Amino acid sequence: MKKNAKVLLYVSLFTVVMVMLFGWVLPAVLQFYLHNMYIKGLTLLFIFSVVVLTKRFTWNNNMVYVIAVFTLLSMLLDTSGNPVTNKPLEWVVSPIGKLQVMQDVNNYAPGEYVIRDNLTILKENGEVLELSTVWLYLYRFVQYLVLYSVVGTLLGAIIGKRPQRGMPFIQTAAEAPLTAEQEQRAAAEMKRRGEAGSVRPIPPQEILDAVRQMKKDGKLIAAIKLVRQHSDMSLGEAKQYVEQL
């Protein structure tokens, strides 16, 4: 009985949360994003910065691909822009008239929105010149391409000054050339390792005693097999080694 009551309580709480989320919270957030002129651009810039800093993208590490993807997404998601980002476009068309960038949001049914972007120029004589939204898309593409390139360069400089987490900071030879003393030590170490690698490991003494006994008993094949099991000798080398014991 107690278990059933808990299940009903959890189901009721889940239902209340879902109703509040989809009935109030999400529609309010959607309305806020649709009607606020600045929030979309700031959100896209914030997400771009988080991705670059988290994944440590730089111009030498796939930064160009991140900028390309975010530029295309931003061009589509933030086509209408805001008064700040549209100011350069207003200056360009000012000899002709006053620029007007409008976004029509029509809500036909709950959750069904139709968004249209309109680009017009209002001339001094009152004539309205309608322009294709293609020009708006092209302008927005250039705008975000420049913006993300500048921000990405600044973030890349910050990333370059921060050591990577979980890994020791290592200076490459190009960044810090070896001194003459360090080069001598490195050469001596390489020579020592080469000499150590040229010495073939031999079986332990107790194995050698067993091999000698097998050889005396005429068990040459077994002796060779035992030598190979305790060394890296080939079959011919092991045979010659046993014969020389």
Image (spheres, rainbow, N blue to C red):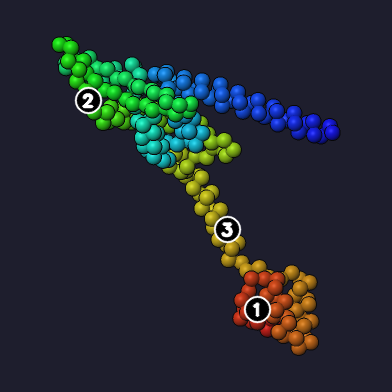
Where is mark 1, residue-wise?
Answer: 238
Q: 110 and 229: which one is in front?
A: 110
Q: Between disc 2 and disc 3, whose residue precedes?
A: 2
> Identity of the amino acid at label 3?
Arg
Residue at image x 70%, y 73%?
A: 229
Quarter location, residue 196: bottom right
Q: Position of residue 5 (x, y in %)?
A: 79, 30
Is label 2 in a helix, a strand or a loop?
A: strand
Is label 3 in a helix, a strand or a loop?
A: helix
Where is mark 3, residue-wise?
Answer: 193
Position of residue 98 relative to residue 207, above or below, is above
> Identity of the amino acid at label 2?
Leu
Q: Position of residue 18 (x, y in %)?
A: 61, 28
Is label 1 in a helix, a strand or a loop?
A: helix
Q: Position of residue 119 (x, y in %)?
A: 26, 23
Position of residue 228 relative to residue 60, above or below, is below
Residue at image x 73%, y 81%?
A: 223
Q: 146 and 230: which one is in front?
A: 146
